[in-house]
Image (cartoon, helix red, strand yellow):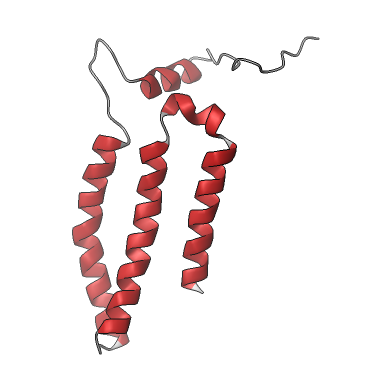
Amino acid sequence: VVYILCCFAIVFVVAFEKVFDHYLEKIEPYYKFWGVKIVVSVTYAQSFIISSCFSLSDEQISLYHCLLCCVELPLLCVLHATKAYPSGTPDEPRPWIQAMIAASQGQHRPSPGAAVQTR
């Protein structure tokens, strides 16, 4: 069941990324989505490997899995923070920061080719 749910999670993230690619391009989603895919894959795979390769009790499997997550996830967090959310310089922020600031100030501009509605 966990394997199926992890596969669905990754498939849905990929589908979301593909469907909304045009809308998300300003926020540079490539590394953001890969961060999610890596966390889901790594946490499931290591749990599966520990339970399959070592003859441990369920409690020990859970303990080792949690221990590995405590070591791996901060490293993945640092990698994700530097690759998925690079800030650029104060004088020249990255495009994803500019897009987020513009959206928060209500300066959302329709994308080229988008239909303009008038009343």
Q: Is 89 displayed left or right of 96 in the figure?
A: left
96 vs 46: above or below: above
Q: Position of residue 97 (x, y in %)?
A: 37, 22
Residue 102 percent across, percent down from the top left: 46, 15
Q: Position of residue 19 (x, y in %)?
A: 59, 39
Report x, y in % for residue 7.
49, 62
Report the number of numbered marks. 0
In this rendering, position of residue 34 left or right of residue 60: right
- Quarter location, residue 87: top left
117 with respect to 29 (left or right): right
Vertical order, 73 against 94 (above or below):
below
Q: Quadrant for residue 18, please give it.
A: top right
Closest to the observer: 83 or 66?
A: 83
Give me the residue at 24% from left, 76% from top.
63
Image point (28%, 42%), residue name: 80
Q: Is residue 83 above or below residue 6?
A: above
Relative horizontal placement of residue 97, taking residue 9 as reference (left or right): left
Question: Taking 5 as reference, is 75 above or below it?
Answer: above
Residue lying furthest right in this view? 119
On the image, which quarter does residue 108 sit in? top right
> Could you tell me which residue is drawn at 42 percent across and 43 percent down?
33
